[in-house]
Image (cartoon, helix red, strand yellow):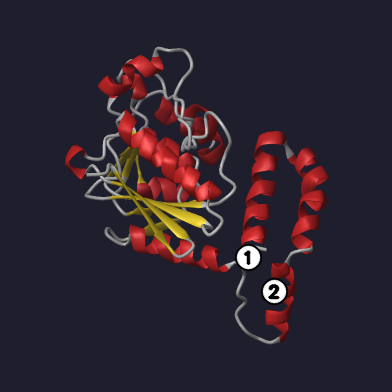
């Protein structure tokens, strides 16, 4: 049985962790299956957005440390293989297409770090989050030390990175770490609802918005300003712009092709 369910539904790629008997603990095999799914999302022109979710009662209990110890000691970190794209975006290129994240139960360590490399987050009420690494003798190495303080503020981030304590979905919603807080069992449906809205929007517009936002975060606002209109120029020459204008004039829903 695959450790990750990968299913294409129209313009949406569903990526589901599928090791519920182990609380979806991530071993190296699971990592590579997720990385292959990210590569598929990036390179399939029909795909416009992904939903990341998990089977069972929990999103993930974290990394299966006994399977990863040698990787952490190599000094190079986690390396995706050929035909893969790092879902943590610690190495290699990043996605230009959005990912909607849906969590339930417990979402620890690598689960939080994958979430931090997604764009819109949904969690069921009662979901618990944690970065437990300091309780296991290491520190977070999947991006939490790089991204968490940007998301929830320095003090909040260090409060949990340095103690390994848990925080709740309700706290995460208050901080803005998650955007939708739903009843248990509704997290996947809400994530799909959001993904479907993204999939109906103009792909070049969505990808341009995401790219410009990421440039501002990684390279700063001044660089993002310089690149704004050069990045917009080819989008303005697309067929989708014509469709967007025509559909507005005709008072109908636009049908975008990503061209």
The image quadrant where one finds the C terminus is bottom right
**Tag 1 near tag 2, CB within 8 Å:** yes
Depth check: give the residue in front, 168 or 113: 113
Residue beneath disc 1: 202
Q: Quadrant of residue 154?
A: top right
Q: CA distance from mark 1 to mark 2?
A: 8 Å
Q: Is residue 118 left or right of residue 73?
A: right
The image quadrant where one finds the N terminus is top left
Query: Which residue is depicted at the point 75% across and 41% down?
Result: 221
Rate crowding at label 1 as few (under 14), some (14 to 19) or many (20 or more) other CA atoms within 10 Å.
many
Q: Position of residue 10 (x, y in %)?
A: 45, 65
Picture layout, residue 137 above or below residue 82: above
Q: Is residue 212 left or right of residue 138?
A: right
Query: Which residue is depicted at the point 41% across and 58% down?
Result: 8
Q: Position of residue 148 (x, y in %)?
A: 50, 35
Depth check: give the residue in front, 45 or 28: 45
């Amino acid at each position: 049985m695959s450790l990750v369910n990968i299913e294409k539904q129209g313009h949406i790629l569903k990526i589901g962790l599928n090791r519920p008997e182990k609380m979806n603990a991530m071993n190296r095999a699971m990592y590579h299956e997720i990385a292959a799914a990210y590569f598929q999302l990036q390179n399939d022109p029909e795909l416009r957005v992904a939903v990341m979710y998990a089977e069972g009662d929990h999103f993930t209990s974290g990394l299966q440390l006994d399977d990863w110890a040698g990787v952490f000691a190599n000094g190079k970190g986690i390396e995706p293989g050929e035909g893969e794209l790092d879902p943590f975006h610690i190495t290699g290129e990043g996605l230009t297409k959005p990912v909607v994240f849906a969590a339930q139960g417990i979402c620890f360590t690598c689960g939080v770090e994958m979430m931090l490399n997604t764009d819109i987050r949904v969690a069921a009420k009662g979901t618990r989050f944690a970065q437990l690494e300091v309780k296991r003798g290491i520190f977070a190495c999947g991006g939490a030390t790089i991204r968490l303080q940007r998301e929830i503020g320095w003090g909040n981030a260090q409060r949990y990175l340095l103690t390994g304590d848990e925080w709740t979905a309700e706290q995460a919603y208050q901080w803005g770490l998650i955007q939708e807080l739903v009843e248990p069992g509704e997290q996947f449906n809400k994530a799909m609802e959001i993904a479907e809205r993204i999939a109906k929007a103009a792909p070049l517009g969505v990808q341009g918005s995401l790219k410009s936002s990421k440039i501002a975060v990684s390279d700063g606002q001044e660089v993002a300003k310089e690149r704004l209109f050069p990045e917009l120029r080819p989008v303005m020459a697309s067929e989708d712009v014509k469709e967007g204008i025509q559909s507005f004039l005709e008072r109908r829903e636009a049908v975008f092709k990503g061209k």
